[in-house]
């Protein structure tokens, strides 16, 4: 490929990816709500076909078809499969979601790259732009997958017959991709405790634990990426060093919870009761990209509406964290990391900043 065209095309792609990155984080609620509605409608459709004899579902996939994108079709199919996965001839499309807001930036590449492609056409292989767009699509797909991971939070699977390997994922057609949700087996309290005590690698990611009582349990060091603990009883739990990327703890009780050195980008603690919680050394990055796009930024952690009375954030670095409406009476923060935390005037009067 001509180096001049490669350079110009790279700049065009970089501009579009920075654009979609900014758009995604400013429209994250709108996108995830739209996707959730589409996924919920797909679940209702599954129940309808199961009433007519369709087997237990093992996979629900939000499917990337690059050829559709080249044809400017950004209605993404939602497919379900039985236990035989791709060998199951009964795969059914049960819905679709609209990815056009994300792929509108992809369209800009086609428009902006047309000029350079024409300028260097004598030096370029045939259909080079189409090939480049096929390869570029996967970068935009990452934002679709991120929105899907957010959309499954709060998704109701009630009444849908699933296998114990049920998985929701955003992936290339007949390929692997991003896991969004995994079946959470129904267990008695002692069975669930034994399951967690095994501390199996990757066993707990993307599970739905909403509304359960885990008071006093030890989750230290576990990978709990994408788990939903909304509405749980988590008082006195130990999450030291746990990976809580994208996990939700909305409306949970978490008094005196130990979150020291946990990794929490994209975690949501909205309206949770975290009084006297220990978050020493807790970390959350969000901004990755400068002038050059490298990968999607992380979503900031959210403590909106939390009760954080007497909580301890010393040595923590929670970049871009949302503390809007949080009760920070007596909450302890590092003075050196003051720039990480956006607080209103009332909150600034409530908190304590230590000098180390």
Image: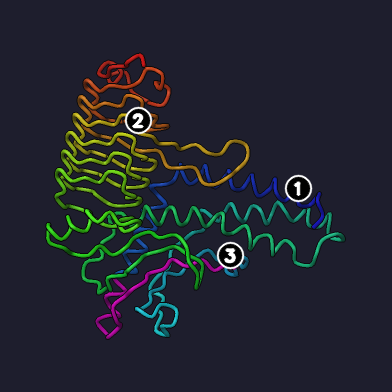
Q: Secondary structure at mark 2?
A: loop
**In the image: residue 278, left or right of residue 83:** left
Q: Quadrant of residue 245?
A: top left
Comparing marks 3 and 2, which lies closer to the viewer?
2
Q: Circle 2 sits on which residue?
A: 281
Q: Circle 1 sits on which residue?
A: 7
User: Cα distance, mark 3 to mark 1?
Assistant: 23 Å
Crowd around label 1: few <14 · some 14–19 · many ≥20 (10 Å): few
Residue 165 shown in magenta: no
Q: Secondary structure at mark 3?
A: helix
- Residue 184, how many percent across, how many down? 25, 62
- Residue 188, how many percent across, how many down? 12, 61
- Residue 36, how many percent across, how many down? 35, 58
Give the mark nearer the N terminus: 3 vs 1: 1
CB atoms of marks 3 and 2 within 8 Å: no
Give the mark nearer the N terminus: 2 vs 1: 1
Q: Which residues are magenta?
A: 44-66
237 vs 269, nearest the viewer = 237
225 vs 218, nearest the viewer = 218
Q: Residue 69, which numbered label?
A: 3
Give the mark nearer the N terminus: 3 vs 2: 3
Compared with 226, 300 (above or below) is: above
């Amino acid at each position: 490929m001509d180096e001049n065209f490669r350079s110009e095309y790279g700049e065009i792609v970089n501009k579009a990816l920075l654009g979609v990155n900014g758009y995604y984080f400013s429209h994250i609620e709108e996108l995830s709500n739209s996707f959730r509605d589409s996924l919920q409608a797909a679940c209702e459709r599954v129940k309808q076909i199961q009433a007519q004899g369709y087997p237990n579902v093992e996979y629900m996939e939000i499917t990337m078809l690059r050829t559709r994108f080249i044809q400017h079709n950004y209605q993404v199919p939602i497919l379900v499969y039985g236990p035989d996965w791709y060998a199951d001839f009964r795969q059914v499309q049960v819905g679709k979601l609209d990815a056009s807001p994300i792929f509108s930036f992809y369209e800009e590449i086609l428009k902006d790259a047309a000029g350079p492609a024409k300028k260097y056409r004598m030096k370029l292989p045939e259909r080079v732009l189409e090939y480049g767009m096929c390869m570029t699509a996967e970068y935009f797909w990452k934002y679709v997958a991120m929105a899907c991971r957010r959309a499954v939070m709060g998704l109701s699977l009630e009444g849908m017959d699933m296998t114990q390997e049920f998985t929701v994922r955003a992936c290339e057609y007949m390929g692997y991709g991003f896991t969004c949700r995994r079946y959470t087996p129904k267990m008695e309290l002692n069975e669930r405790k034994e399951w967690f005590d095994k501390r199996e690698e990757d066993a707990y990611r993307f599970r739905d634990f909403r509304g359960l009582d885990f008071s006093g349990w030890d989750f230290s060091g576990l990978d709990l990426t994408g788990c939903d603990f909304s509405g749980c009883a988590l008082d006195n739990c130990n999450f030291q060093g746990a990976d809580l990327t994208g996990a939700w703890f909305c409306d949970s009780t978490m008094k005196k919870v130990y979150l020291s050195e946990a990794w929490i980008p994209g975690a949501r603690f909205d309206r949770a009761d975290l009084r006297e919680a220990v978050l020493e050394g807790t970390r959350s990055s969000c901004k990755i990209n400068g002038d050059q796009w490298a990968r999607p930024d992380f979503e900031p952690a959210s403590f909106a509406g939390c009760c954080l009375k007497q909580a301890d954030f010393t040595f923590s670095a929670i970049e871009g964290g949302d503390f809007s409406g949080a009760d920070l009476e007596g909450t302890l923060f590092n003075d050196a990391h003051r720039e990480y935390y956006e607080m209103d005037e009332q909150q600034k009067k409530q908190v304590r900043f230590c000098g180390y």
